[in-house]
Image (cartoon, grey):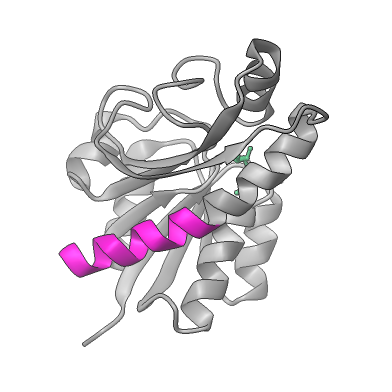
C-alpha cells in the first residue's frame, strides 16, 4: 500500500504543517507531503518544509498551483493556515479532496473577516464560554463545506486572544491529523 500523497498550502508560521510533517515521519499518518505551496514568500512554514526535504513553491496563481500539485502527484490537499481564498480552478481539480482547518466551532466566528487571531478576538469580545476548532471540506463558499471534525474547549475568564489562540492551536493540530487519517481511509 503506497503512502497517500499530500499537498499542503500555508501562509504563515506553519505549526499545522509541522503537525502533519511530524505525524507522517512518526508513522501516525500513512502519508507523505509531496509539495508545500505558500502565497507568502516569507512564510516560516516554507523553512519547516525545507528542513524536511519537502519541495516548496511560492505562488498566488491557482492554475500554476493546480498544475504543480498534479505534477507532484498530490491526491489530497490541506489548507493549513492558508489565508487566500481558493478558486474553483483548484476546487474543480480536487473535488471533495481539499481539507481546511478553522480555529473556531463553525459556523461561529467564521466567514469573511474571521481568520487567525481575529477569530479569537471575536470570541473574547463576544464573551462566549466554549470555542474550539473545525476541519471541513472546501467548496466555493468560504468556510461553508461539509464539516468533518470539531473539538471544543472552555474559554478561561483570564484568557486573552493570544492565550486562547495557543490552546486552540493544540486542538487544530490534533483534529487536523485525525481528519487526514480519516480521509486517507476513504480515498
Ligand atoms: C492560526 O491562527 C491558526 O489558528 C489558523 O491559521 C493560523 C496560522 O496557523 N489555522 P499555522 O501556525 O500557520 O498553522
Residues rendered magenta in the picture: 174-187
**Quarter of the figure with residue 160:** top right
Q: Residue furthest bottom?
A: 1
Front residue of 114/40: it is 114
Instruction: Say whether residue 168 is magenta.
Output: no
Q: Quadrant of ligand 1?
A: top right
The total of numbered circles placed on residues is 0
Q: Residue furthest right?
A: 158
Specify whether 13 is left or right of 20: right
Where is residue 27 drawn, in percent x and y? 45, 84
Specify whether 40 is left or right of 100: right
Q: Residue at x 35, y 53 (%)?
A: 77
Front residue of 145/51: it is 145
130 over 187 or under it: above or below: above
Where is residue 124 drawn, in percent x and y? 70, 20
Where is residue 7 drawn, in percent x and y? 39, 59
Q: Residue at x 26, y 60 (%)?
A: 183
Quadrant in which the N terminus is drawn: bottom left
Q: Is residue 62 visible?
A: yes
146 over 177 or under it: above or below: above
Instruction: Say whether residue 182 is magenta.
Output: yes
Front residue of 13/162: it is 162
156 over 21 or under it: above or below: above
Q: Is residue 41 visible?
A: no
Q: Residue at x 47, y 15 (%)?
A: 112
Quadrant in which the C terminus is drawn: bottom left
Q: Main secondary structure of the magenta part?
A: helix
11 over 74 or under it: above or below: above
Where is residue 8 drawn, in percent x and y? 45, 55
Amino acid at each position: 500500500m503506497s503512502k497517500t500523497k499530500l499537498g499542503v498550502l500555508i501562509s504563515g508560521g506553519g505549526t499545522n504543517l509541522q503537525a502533519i510533517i511530524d505525524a507522517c515521519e512518526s508513522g501516525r499518518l500513512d502519508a507523505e507531503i509531496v509539495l508545500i505551496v505558500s502565497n507568502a514568500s516569507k512564510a516560516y512554514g516554507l523553512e519547516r518544509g525545507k528542513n524536511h526535504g519537502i519541495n516548496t513553491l511560492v505562488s498566488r496563481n491557482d492554475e500554476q498551483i493546480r498544475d504543480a500539485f498534479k505534477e507532484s502527484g498530490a491526491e489530497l490537499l490541506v489548507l493549513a493556515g492558508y489565508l487566500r481564498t481558493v478558486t474553483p480552478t483548484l476546487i474543480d481539480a480536487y473535488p471533495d479532496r481539499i481539507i481546511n482547518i478553522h480555529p473556531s466551532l463553525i459556523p461561529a466566528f467564521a466567514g469573511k473577516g474571521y481568520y487567525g487571531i481575529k477569530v479569537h478576538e471575536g470570541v473574547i469580545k463576544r464573551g462566549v464560554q466554549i470555542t474550539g476548532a473545525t476541519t471541513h471540506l472546501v467548496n466555493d463558499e468560504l468556510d461553508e463545506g461539509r464539516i468533518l471534525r470539531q473539538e471544543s474547549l472552555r474559554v478561561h475568564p483570564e484568557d486573552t486572544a493570544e492565550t486562547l489562540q495557543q490552546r486552540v492551536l493544540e486542538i487544530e493540530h490534533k483534529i487536523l491529523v485525525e481528519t487526514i487519517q480519516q480521509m486517507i481511509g476513504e480515498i
